[in-house]
Image (cartoon, helix red, strand yellow):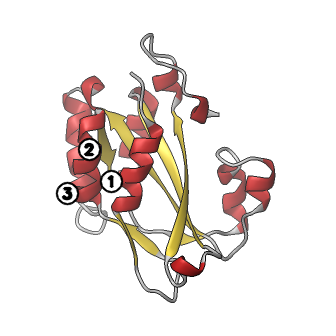
Amino acid sequence: MKVDYNSIKKCIVRATKQLSPKTLAFKINADKLNESVRESGLVFIDNGTSSRGVESEDIPLISEYFKKDKLEWFNRSRHFTTITFIQADKMDEEAERLVILLHDVKQTEDRDFDRVEAVSYLLANYPCYSATVVAYQSNDPRKLGKNSYTIIMRANVVAITQEEYEYNNEDI
């Protein structure tokens, strides 16, 4: 399956809402995003939709997505989140059950449901695509007070090792 990362990135931006003009904090509308990526053959895994400020301990994981000057660009004024999609045609009953639970059940509502375990299981066993979404303030005068976003996407190992996987230069 070839995923059109540029199309998915546009869907992500359209589903993103800046929380206040005075902050880079943003939230992703899970339902809107899920609806817009459906035609691309993906399902959004609701493993968190709110951004947070970048901390020094985040940089090693972020460095898996950003390299050289793009990594040096990071400072504490950025906000980010990482979101994940699963390939719809590879989902079985267990994957569907977990995706529904992740969307419908918040950790505070059901302490027995382990969201970490559910997301780990999905990423370990199904073809998934993750996107790191970073908000920053652009120097463009037309965008003053509005977030700009840079998004890097990658396929997980399960997706890459599929026989029908098509190499996407943006995976690197």
What is the tally of numbered marks visible in this picture? Answer: 3
Q: Label 2: how many residues lie within 10 Å, few (<14), some (14-19) or many (20+)?
A: many
Label 2 SS: helix
For image coordinates 31% across by 46% down, the residue present is 44
User: Looking at the figure, which quarter contains the N terminus?
Assistant: top left
Q: Are marks 2 and 1 in contact (CB under 8 Å)?
A: yes
Task: Name the disc covering residue 99, or none.
Answer: 2
Which quadrant does the C terminus fall into? top right
In the rendered structure, which amino acid carries the disc numbered 3? Asp
Q: Is residue 95 left or right of residue 161?
A: left
Q: Gap between marks 2 and 1, in whole Å?
A: 7 Å
- Could you tell me residue 27's position as x and y percent? 39, 70
Q: Nearer the viewer, residue 117 or 58?
A: 58
- Residue 114 in sight here: yes
Going by the numbered disc 1, the residue's amino acid type is: Asp
Residue at 28% x, 58% y is 30
Q: Earlier in the sequence, mark 2 or mark 1?
A: 1
